[in-house]
Image: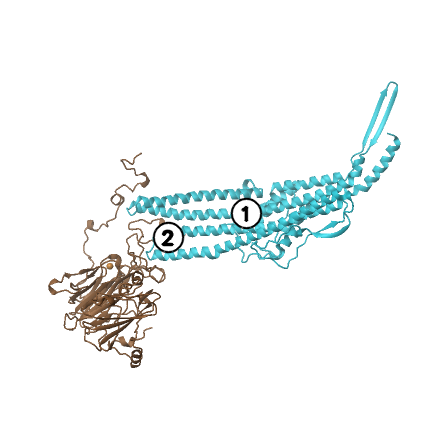
Amino acid sequence: MSSYSFMRRTVLGVALTLLLGGCATFSKDGGFDSVAQIAEARLGKTVRPVRSSDDARAIDASIKNLLAKPLTADDAVQIALLNNRGLQAGYAELGIAEADLVQAGRLHNPGFDFKHITQGADTIIERTFTMSLVNLIMLPQASRLEQQRFEAVKLQVANQVLRLAADTRKAYFEAVAAQQSVLYAKQVNAAAEAGAELGNRMARVGNWSKLEQDREQVFYADATAAVARAEKESVMAREKLTRLLGLWGDETQFQLPERLPDLPARPLQVKDAEAFAINNRLDIQAARQQTASLASSLGLTRTTRFINVLDLGYVRNTDSGLPRATGYELSLEIPIFDWGSARVARAEAIYMQSVNHLAETAVNARSAVRESYLGYRSAYDLARHYRDNIVPLRKQISDENLLRYNGMLISVFELLADAREQVLSVNGYINALKDYWVAQTDLSAALGGNLPANLSNKE
Amino acid sequence: MTSRRDFLSASGAVLMGAAMVSRVQAASLPEAVTQSDPATMPPLLPSNGRPYNPVVTLNGWSLPWRMKNGWKEFHLVAEPVVREIAPGMKANLWGYNGQSPGPTIEVVEGDKVRIFVTNKLPEHTSVHWHGQILPNGMDGVSGLTQPAIQPGKTFVYEFVARHPGTFMYHPHADEMAQMAMGMMGFWVTHPKNPGFMPVDRDFVFLLNAYDVEPGSYTPKINTMLDFNLWTFNSRAFPGIDPLVVRKGDRVRIRAGNLTMTNHPLHLHGLNFEVTGTDGGWVPKSARWPEVTTDIAVGQMRAIEFVADAPGDWAFHCHKSHHTMNAMGHSVPTMIGVDHKGIAEKITKLVPDYMVMGDKGGSMGDMEMPIPDNTLPMMTGQGQFGPIEMGGMFTVVKVREGLARNDYKDPGWYHQPPGTRAYEWTGEMPAAASAPVKPDATSAAPSGAAQPVFNIKRGGVHEH
Ligand SMILES: [Cu+2]
């Protein structure tokens, strides 16, 4: 190596370093702001990474505050978003990706090589100053790739936030419903206990046979088993929620409300659900972003036409059970390029792969929206059916049976059996109501984490 | 609803409106008089034809007729009706001329009788003249002796009432359904000689039964034996009128049984003789003195007594379930069962629950709401408290100095001082006063006072 070449390299290296140095620094938020924005916009919730003991103290304080009273579904989501360690671990991905991005934007450190060779009487001293030329040439492209990866990680983390919110919400409804079911199982058990006790006393004074007595006893025994089963399910549901909330120690004594939120007066009428989902879902945004960045990285700049990827392979499904929404516009347009020469055949294939992937994501999203809306509507209708028909009818039957008991037309055992039936129907309603809230959560997840603003359906 | 109430006014005179008569004569079909009032109507004194001593139909009435060319013409209309079984309960029944049972038909031995039967039911019917000796083609067995009367059609039955006595009429077409719905009526053929076995008061009624689910209105026609309403003329006590008689009257009571079981009718305070059966009058030498006479299914009985004892005398079927209204037949016996602690548990689940039956079946005068259109199981208030009776129960009220045709309820009997059971207020021997309470060992000799699961019996079942 001559000193001439050394000089050339040094000059070039300094120039490039000056040129690229500006875009390769750490951001102030570490990529967290966009995640926080998504959480705020879609969930109305705060997310906060724990980076210091101050952060941890602040989070602890807000959690204590939220745990002071029976949790609402929103409280539960907020606690999970602040406290779930898996999510906090996910935030670290942001830092890693950003570090990679910054790293990619910097030149590798130059190497300095010094050789001192003694060969007989000769002494050869060789000094070499090296810089990675490849690194230098690839630097802009590596930066761009890392930038894309950083953006993708942001979306992934945001998606994790949304998924955790949905999982927490569902676990919350399951836990409240399970806790309520225990109460009802205990009521059934109380009825069975009264019947069994009465049966014993009837047998004792000679009014009942052992067979009849045993029938009441076994019913009581079964009812006791049902209480144990309900309690076990309640513990499981509560623990699942506790895990998602990231709670331990005394914090696990959190209180849940006695009952699920009431069924809303009307179900949501989501008219342009599919269009909303296409614009709102993070998976579609990620796929679209990838397609766009491919276009730029493959040097595809000249637009000749647009295609609507949602027209690709889309078959109208007219017997989905839902009335066809009319009058909504839905498009996800992607430019198609004039490929020109054979040189870009490969680029074309890569790009089209990405376009089709995007189209597939969009088609799946639309299907998921339809499916979850159908599930939501039938859950609503079922819960309403329980509330407006089954439960009142059971109550009416119980009232009528009491009249028959008063008239000595039926016995107290039929009255007790009927009380059990009534309790089971109420429990059936609890389950239907829980299914409704779970379905509402699924619908909102399918729409991209929130419901359209005009459909706010406060629980 | 009543179209011819004036007919049956207190005087008992039959006053057919001239305009109405000419219209129906023109149509050549007698007016179908209807009645919907469930009260006992005064006797229908004959205004034409042969003279006779009319009967009084308990909670019912007798059907007016017209004479035409020597024929006594009646018009029965088979139709759906609403019958008040007792105040507070109505039933959708099928009957004749506005009521179930239909009106009593009274004729005189030797009368040529022509009966028009119009079918306003939704299905075919026929009328069988139970106990009458008549031409085969007039016997009213659909399919066997005549084609059935289809809905909307009118048939004519003609025969001579040859034998005096006590009879009934009812369908012999889909009779299981039609009789379960209340299609029936009484028939009396008076003797040609009004001086034959005369009585001062002659009551008639049918024994019938229905199964009306508490809270419903229409009988369950497929019930075979497990009826819940046992009635005299489709009335259950306290809806059954009293049999009001004047002291010293010779009284006849005729009953026909159209239920599916026998009814031992029992009269308090007076003994009677069975003077008539299905076949006719019983010769004096063959009459049985009785206070209870069992009336088998499909039978008719006439009993007679002289009302020599004033008072309110119970008169009822002696099957105790037949003096109850709707009751639960599978309600377990709660007598002697201690409810301590349990009642509270049950009340948590059934807030309006109240312990019943632990001291017996009596509900006393407890007043609790029961299903719509349902009669309390046992009810009726007397001057000394609840009578606790329903169903086939009424009272024969013997009073001095009533007018000959006065059937008005005279109220409760005032017993002469010193003739009523009274409470002992003297000294009480200690032993005799201890209440007998079944205890575990005597009531459950198998040792059920111990947890019953632990009972082990010896012998082959031991493993
Ligand atoms: Cu009887």
Query: Residue A298: x and y, percent?
Result: 76, 44
Q: Which residue is mark 2?
A: A415
Is residue A399 placed above or below A159 in the rendered structure? below
The number of discs equals: 2
Q: Residue at x 88, y 31 (%)?
A: A3
**B413 horizontally vs A164: left or right:** left
Where residue A395 sits, quadrant-wise, is bottom left
Query: Residue A142: x and y, percent?
Result: 75, 40
Q: Nearer the viewer, residue A155 or A182?
A: A155
Residue B90 visible within the image: no
Identified by mark 1, the residue type is Tyr
Question: Callout 2: few (<14), some (14-19), or many (20+) C-alpha neighbours within 10 Å?
Answer: many
The subunit letter for the residue under badge 2 reads A
Chain that appears cyan? A
Q: Quadrant of the C terminus of chain A?
A: bottom right
Chain that appears brown? B
Query: Residue A247: x and y, percent?
Result: 57, 42
Q: Nearer the viewer, residue B350 or B462?
A: B462
Where residue A396 sits, quadrant-wise, is bottom left
Where residue B399 sits, quadrant-wise, is bottom left
Q: Which residue is mark 1?
A: A172
**A265 horizontally vs B306: left or right:** right
